[in-house]
Amino acid sequence: MLNEETEVVVVGAGQAGVAMSEHLGAHGVSHIVLERHRIAERWRSERWDSLVANGPAWHDRFPGLEFFNVADDGFASKEQVADYFVAYAEKIGAPVRTGVEVTSVRRHSGRPGFRVETSEGSIDARFVVAATGPFQRPVFPPIVPDGAVPVQLHSSKYRNPEQLPEGAVLVVGAGSSGVQIADELRRSGRRVFLSVGPHDRPPRQYRGRDFCWWLGVLGRWDAETPPQGAEHVTIAVSGARGGHTVDFRALVADGIELVGMTAAYEDGVLRFAPDLAANIALGDAKYLELLRAADAYVGRNGLDLPEEPEAHVLGPDPECMTDPRLELDLAGAGVTSIVWATGFAADYGWLEVDTFDERGRPVQRRGVSREPGVYFLGLPWLSRRGSSFIWGVWHDARYVADHIATQRGYLAYGSTDRSGVVPAAQNV
């Protein structure tokens, strides 16, 4: 591959890149999808062994293909999700090239488009879509120094309980990953501490419907901006063991000790913020608000869905909430491992264009960046609350593809190639 040309280079062949390819193909736009590993690689090699999708199969998929051997209300395993995207790419004939790493993208000087440098040569493209998603660089807070415990690892490196040395485990972060890993470790017989920060805690099911359904009919997937201060709040939801509502009181009853946010370390002692009760109360309030909104929707529409009054009963606060632990002597508690389920950050060091703010975040609207010809896809809240979900990425990709098709029309005006001269209609 040397000095090749194409109209669009899509960087990344996860759910975002595959969706982008489908919509570009529908417009007849020539493109190449470059993936440094395999299609949907992060699902295979950067998640724990027992991970399943957090949304049911009827919801977390593209419109054009159902999951194989997964019931509509079931939750696909990580391998089934990866296989799904491989099958989808084959179905649409996506021009994916695996094992090709993009090392830099720079705008041409004196002519349109970009030079895309890769591990296998260079490509000239009029448009570039960064479809690498939000899970690029693990966030590993530098709180506990190396050597303070035998093992510290990010959740992206955790695979199963047998991977860790014998002893207690502290899991930091109470979103979907942290809660599921802590629960798995406790079920394996470990003593487990779970550090809980601010979170959203929806019901897995309520009145016979999954929370994905409730967010849909209540219009909340289409919210265009997050509530102030909630741009990065984690969601505690689980599809594990057939799917269940995350209940922190139940986790305590099962033997997990909850602590507040991990704050500082000194001389073998880890200190926690005194915010555990407040963080859980905030999650409870969001949970109960959604139940009330669902009840109101049922009443307005006269739906025959069974009442579920017990879902509104939270139960008493356990002692770890009313009298929280603020310090933990790691050696004294037998803690030999810390799993940091603290999320990820974006890494666009390869994209050398002027479309990032002072914190390195893409400056864009619905995926259209301030650098003409550069697009982003797969980011949380790209256009709406559902943007980082599988189905949401598919709809965002359609908007970006329509925008590219429109720009092709303008660029073709006055040239001998009149294909695409009529701008495509934009999604709204």
Image: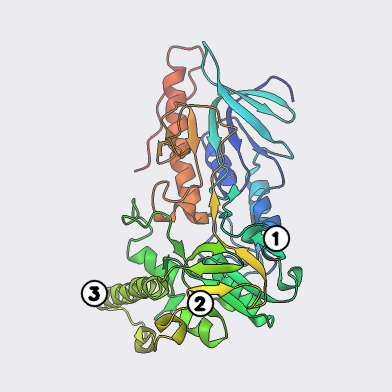
Amino acid type at image mark 2: Leu
Q: How far apart are marks 2 and 1 (CA)?
A: 24 Å
Q: Mark 2 or mark 3, which has the lower sequence index? A: 2
Q: In which quarter of the image is the N terminus?
A: top right
Instruction: Verify CB contact (< 8 Å) between mark 3 and mark 1.
Output: no
Please determine whether, in this image, residue 401 is positioned above or below residue 392.
above
The answer to whether the residues at label 2 and label 3 have Cβ atoms under 8 Å apart is no
Counting residues from the N terminus, which is met first, the one under dot 3 or under dot 1?
A: 1
Q: Which of marks 2 and 1 is in front?
A: 1
The crowd level at tag 2 (other Cα within 10 Å; few <14, some 14-19, many 20+) is many
Q: In this view, does 41 lie to the left or right of 276?
A: right
Q: Nearer the viewer, residue 249 or 135?
A: 249
Query: How busy is the neighbourhood of tag 3: few (under 14 within 10 Å), some, or many (20 plus)?
Result: few
Q: Which amino acid does label 3 sit on?
A: Arg
Please tell me which residue is depicted at 71% across the width and 56% down the height of the picture. 45
Question: Residue at the location (65% across, 24% down)?
Answer: 123
Number of labelled discs?
A: 3
Sequence-first disc among 2 and 1: 1
Relative to 370, say whether 314 is above or below: below
How did the renderer colour the structure?
rainbow
Residue 147 - label: 1
| Mark carried by residue 72 | none
Mark 2 vs mark 3, foreground winner is 2
Q: In this view, does 137 lie to the left or right of 391?
A: right
Name the residue tied to disc 3. 300
What residue is shown with label 2? 258
Between the C-alphas of marks 2 and 3, the distance is 39 Å
Q: Which quadrant of the rendered structure holds the C terminus? A: top left
Q: Nearer the viewer, mark 3 or mark 1?
A: 1
Answer yes or no: is residue 55 visible.
no
- Corner quadrant of residue 307: bottom left
Most extreme residue toward the front is: 267
